Amino acid sequence: MTGQHEALSAWESFCDDLKSAGRLLLRPTTPQGEIDQVTGARALSRNIALALQFELENNDPLYPELLHYFDPIRKQGGDNTDAIYVGAPVNGQDTYVIHGDRGTARYFAITVLEDGATPWGGKVVGSLLGKDLSVDDDGSFRVTLSPEAQPGNWIRTSPGTYRVTIRQFFGNWSAERPMHARIDRLGADPLLPPPVPDAERLSRGLAAAARWVDVSLNYWADMLDRWQVQPHVFLSYRELDHNAIDATPGGEPLICYWKVKRGEVLLVRVRPPAGYWWGVEFGNYYWETMDYRYRLCSTNCDHAVIEDDGELIVVVSHEDPGLPNWLDPSGYEEGYITFRWIGTDHYPRPDCHLIATSELPAALPPAVKRISREARSAQLIDRRTGILQRFGN
């Protein structure tokens, strides 16, 4: 009965620890509206699966698998409407090979990082961008991760290495294909499977998972609070925080905290620079994107409608403004907007103006581009088609 007692004790401790994570809802900076409180509780529940994946199920660098981090219903930390993130645990002693079909995502990057002060790790050990990746004519690729130099695509690992992350950012959601690949540790003996579960590993993994839920969601809330005190101003991570974090290589995200009540409109204007990818992400206080399957809550370099003079006009409003680049607040009255500029020679800071809805027509250029109800419907249909193309079923 000892095993039964230890397993039950580990489970009960896990449940108790998860209860304490609910303090997230009581923070003085957490919005107190019903939708915000419900969303906070949902964010806690959504991240249990992610925590278990990281801390219990796929946490052994001797048996790594490339698994998805986020999807349309599992989100945190600015999960990026245009992206697929996959990753695996690795160490700095062994040699690993990632190989398969590269796919056709507009932006592609492999990043090796060390453990660190953030829930997603710390110092970036090395990166390999898609533009620097050698890919065969049939789309296949092979990348080696190891402490010693290797021919071909290679990223050097360090003694503190603990994870590899692969980012794919999509421009044309319906036309671009995601990567299909695997990771293998060289020298692994196929006759030696992973250890069977035992009470010690279960207890350690569940405790770490509960901790991760609490720490990670509060980490991102702490971060967003830095933007919350100065709403409608776009600032980068580097302007507000000096922690080493696994930031997107080759680009610079600019973020603002938005607050828009009914009867108000946030007008965001910028001239996108030349580059191979940029996107606009939109989400709630918990740094989750809105439901991008069914709502117009993002745009990017392929989907955005640009004015004839090169300006991008984005509008946050609770009612459809009849403009092509609408960000639907989805019932929320505050949250975040991120502009991600990738591969550009500069990172323009968008201008924000909060105005009454009645003032919007006068604030727009006379020849501003508009959208019909039929075209809006087509936008939304195309979004879900693109999500199914990206994530499958």
Image: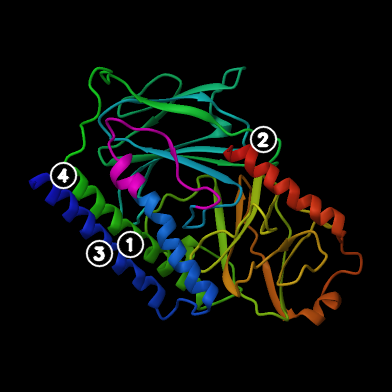
The magenta span reads 52-73
Q: How far apart are the alpha carbons under marks 2 and 1?
A: 35 Å
Tag 2 residue: 176
Q: Amino acid at mark 4?
A: Ala
Q: Say which of marks 3 and 1 sits in front.
A: 3
Tag 4 residue: 199
Q: Is residue 13 visible?
A: yes
Circles 2 and 4: CB atoms closer than 8 Å? no
Q: How far apart are the alpha carbons under marks 2 and 4?
A: 44 Å
Q: Amino acid at mark 3?
A: Asp
Tag 1 residue: 215
Tag 3 residue: 16
Q: How far apart are the alpha carbons under marks 3 and 1?
A: 15 Å
Residue 359 vertical position relative to residue 235 in the rendered view, above or below: below
Q: Circle 2 — which element?
A: loop
Q: Amino acid at mark 1?
A: Val
Asked whether 274 or 201 is in front, the reply is 201
Quadrant that contains the C terminus: top right
